[in-house]
Amino acid sequence: MEIKVTAGDIAGIDADAILVNHFEGMKSPDGETATVDRALGGAVAQLIKQGEIKGKLNEVTMLHSFGKLPAARVVVVGLGKKSDLSVNKVRGAVAETCRWLRAREISTIATVPQGANINKIGPGDAAQAIAEGALLGTYTFRKHMTKKEDKPGEIKRLSIVGAGRLKARLEKGADKGRIISEATNLARDMVNEPANYMTPTDMAETAARLAREQGLEITILDLEQMKKLGMGGMLGVSRGSRQPPKFMVLNYKGGTAKEPDIALVGKGITFDSGGISIKPSDKLEEMKGDMAGGAAVIAAMVAISQLKPKINVMALIPATENLPDGNALKPGDVLTAMNGKTMEIISTDAEGRLVLADALSYAKKHGAGKMVDAATLTGACRIALGDICTGAFGNNQELIDRIIAAGNEAGELVWQMPMFDEYGEQNKSDVADVKNVGGRLAGAITAAKFLAEFVDDTPWVHLDIAGTSLTDKERGYQIKGATGVPVRTLVNLVVSLAQKPSK
Ligand code: BES
Ligand code: MN
Ligand code: ZN
């Protein structure tokens, strides 16, 4: 879908459909909706009076213009109560409307800047939300379907139409929305991809291609290089798989410092069978998505390289399969992570924290000023928070607060979890420095406490996305399958750190 901004009046635009809006509780059409209503001889006003258009959030009503306007159809989008409007509601309503129109094979649409100048939503914010709603909400993953009937139509063009004096702001917002949404859809594609099409090698090749396209530096460490660096977690987890592990290092240099201002670390388990501590087979296919953190970090780097914030960002993605063969890691084994700490394996299914141990050590060694990791780390986090919000765990309240704010801006909810010292006790091992399972109680927190062992005092936040990386239903701009969480949170965070560095 092409997104463009047009200066002018929506009533004068020629498209298959033009989008105006109506708010719940209002008795007559307002603003541009009123202009369009006059051209239609009061049809919208009449439908409001009859109660057919209520303005409820995500309500879609289509009228035909029969030559009274250049556009063939007028769509009235319900935006709910005016006082409750937010950018996230605009995203959702635009997404639902676009899917509704796509199902009716409508291919060119034009819209007013939905939500602009209401509840502190600026024209740029509105344009960004519209672009995001449209691009995220019409996402599909059909590449492995061979029948044409299974492929829906496509909205070819969406124009955002506003007054000429707003054009620059609308364009900037729309462009940012497009960059961020395309990156999110890229992460969704990688996560939805079956594990036989997204091995560690495939993931590294994808990252290399994207890095080349964006002019990002990339290094891909192979098994030999991981051995030299002493990445015992990576070596241990990958032992049971025929697929060679890959450790991706990407660098975006927008700042002046020599070192990375921030490292983004993403878990890249391309399939998690549990290893010798094998998982039950129910829903096991979902474990192709155990690289969602890694995919989000790669995608965020693509968006960052297009938005060009003045900051240095290093991205690290430890990628491997977790499978059980005769050479596999076993419960009771002890591994030494890159920072020299020893880890007793209680469960080979707690593999994410083992590879993240090496990645966090690597980030520290390379002088990262801050670290944020994203990982589908624990079923416990999913049980605790569901698919509604991501769990945040960290050692620095300011960074946690900034991530929560970055998530809110994106509509990706983040909830802080406790990190009391007492939880760390559960990870004490009788034979090594730490053990990789701290018992059943507080499983998401003890996993985070394990990671903290490899962080020391660098400001760090761990995002457990086990619940939020996938969704089983269509909801607003979320499509069943991979959500792309937390791409937009990471991008917002990096952009905000570049604009206003923390102390
Ligand atoms: N990848 C899983 C966590 C997960 C579970 C993600 C469900 C998405 C949905 C992780 O590697 C894992 O297996 N964690 C174990 C840890 C346990 C052995 C301490 C878990 O949560 O059961
Ligand atoms: Mn596991
Ligand atoms: Zn896992």
Image (spheres, rainbow, N blue to C red):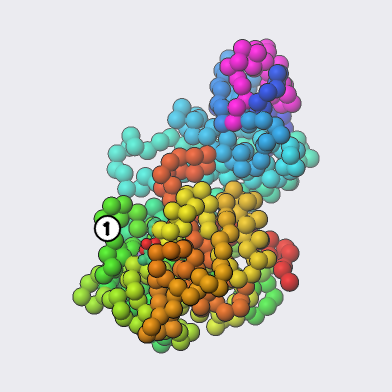
Q: From the viewer's perspective, is residue 273 above or below residue 431?
A: above
In this view of the protein, which residue sits in the foreground, 177 or 369?
369
Q: What residue type is labelled 1?
A: Pro
Circle 1 is placed at which residue position? 280
Q: Does the residue labelled 1 lie within 8 Å of ligand 1?
A: no
Q: Which residue lies furthest to the right in this view?
A: 165
SS at circle 1: loop
Q: Is residue 43 magenta?
A: yes
Q: Is residue 438 visible in the rendered structure shown here?
A: yes
Circle 1 residues within 10 Å: few <14, some 14–19, many ≥20: few
Q: In this view, does 444 lie to the left or right of 27?
A: left
The quarter of the picture showing ligand 1: bottom left
- Residue 458, image x, y percentages: 61, 76
The image quadrant that residue 248 belongs to is bottom left
Residue sitting at 66 percent across and 40 percent down?
A: 86
Residue sitting at 44 percent across and 75 percent down?
A: 427
Residue sitting at 50 percent across and 74 percent down?
A: 424
In the image, the segment drawn in magenta is 30-57
Query: Which part of the image, by quadrant, shows the C terminus?
Result: bottom right
Q: Is residue 200 visible in the rendered structure shown here?
A: no
- Residue 438, image x, y percentages: 42, 71
- Residue 5, image x, y percentages: 66, 40
- Residue 502, image x, y percentages: 72, 68
In this view of the protein, which residue sits in the foreground, 380 or 6?
380
The image quadrant that residue 301 belongs to is bottom right
In this view of the protein, which residue sits in the foreground, 142 or 26?
26
Tally of numbered tags: 1
Q: In this view, does 46 lie to the left or right of 278?
A: right
Q: Is residue 36 magenta?
A: yes
Q: From the viewer's perspective, is residue 284 above or below residue 39?
A: below
Residue sitting at 32 percent across and 59 percent down?
A: 195
